[in-house]
Amino acid sequence: MACGNTSTADSLVLGAIQIMIGIFHIFMWYFLLVLYMGQIKGVFGTYEPITYKTGCAFWGIFYIVSGASTIRSTQKSSQYLTIWALIMNIFSVITAFIALCLTVFELSTFHSVSYRNYGQAKLGREVSRILLASYLLEIGIALAHSICCCARLNETEDQRTRRSSSLQLNKKTRSARASKEQTEDLRKPHSRSSFLSLSKKSSSTRASQGRKAIE
């Protein structure tokens, strides 16, 4: 899914980062769930922000799907996969922006809670600050992938043919490089001696089988 100055390897790395962001959000959602459910009801009540009630951190599952779709569309050039990756990345941008707004609203307001739950509320707000930065990162990555998908869909048939031929050429170059490295390994003394020992063993095995057949 390379577009402009973005290479295929860069697209794969950014897709993997999206998956890691989504996994991190799932873990943070579970942490906040355990944290807030363990509160004790006091005189001033418990701390339950709007991000906890809406489950914003659990929306990381969409980021995982977006990253997987991006990697799949990069590895296998297909118009349907590109459209699916575009849809998921746009949806990720929307959900991350909504979660960003809700997190800003949570951090800008704070009501009194029971002194027993103040530590949990403070820790939860620190987690929300960390998630705030990850939302910005997800918006940037998903938006970049969406632009790349749009550019890829607007390609002409000749550009697609050139891109597919360049990918095939890169594969052939990598295979030729690997075969060259294997040849260089065989030219080394220890590799040559091991190859000769294997050939001697195979010849002795054939000779013993020939004797048994004669007997």
Image (cartoon, grey):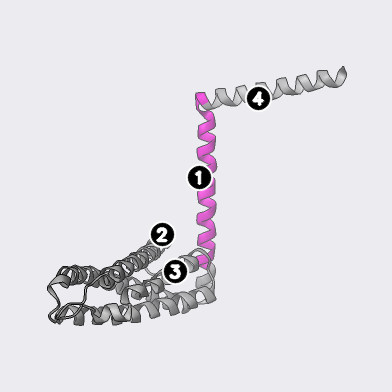
Q: Are marks 2 and 1 in contact (CB under 8 Å)?
A: no
Q: CA distance from mark 3 to mark 4?
A: 48 Å
Q: CA distance from mark 2 to mark 3?
A: 12 Å
Q: Which residue is mark 3?
A: 70
Q: Is residue 214 above or below residue 46?
A: above
Q: Quadrant of residue 214?
A: top right
Q: Which residue is mark 1?
A: 177
Q: Quadrant of residue 19?
A: bottom left
On residue 199, the disc is 4
Is residue 207 shown in magenta? no
Q: Which residue is mark 2?
A: 9
Q: Are marks 1 and 3 in contact (CB under 8 Å)?
A: no
- Asked if residue 36 lies left or right of residue 202, the reply is left
Q: Residues within 10 Å of mark 1 (few under 14, many from 20)?
A: few
- Asked if residue 169 lies left or right of residue 22, the reply is right
Amino acid under disc 1: Arg
Mark 2 or mark 3: whose residue is earlier in sequence = 2
Q: Secondary structure at mark 2?
A: helix
Q: Position of residue 192 (x, y in %)?
A: 55, 25
Between marks 1 and 3 in the image, the one whose residue lies nearer the viewer: 3
Q: Is residue 185 above or below residue 44?
A: above
Residue at 66% across / 21% down in the picture? 200
Q: Are marks 3 and 4 in contact (CB under 8 Å)?
A: no
Q: CA distance from mark 2 to mark 4?
A: 41 Å
Q: Which span is picked out in magenta?
A: 162-190
**Magenta part, dominant SS:** helix
Q: Is residue 136 above or below residue 101?
A: above
Q: Which image quadrant: the C terminus? A: top right
Is residue 170 shown in magenta? yes
Mark 4 or mark 1: whose residue is earlier in sequence = 1
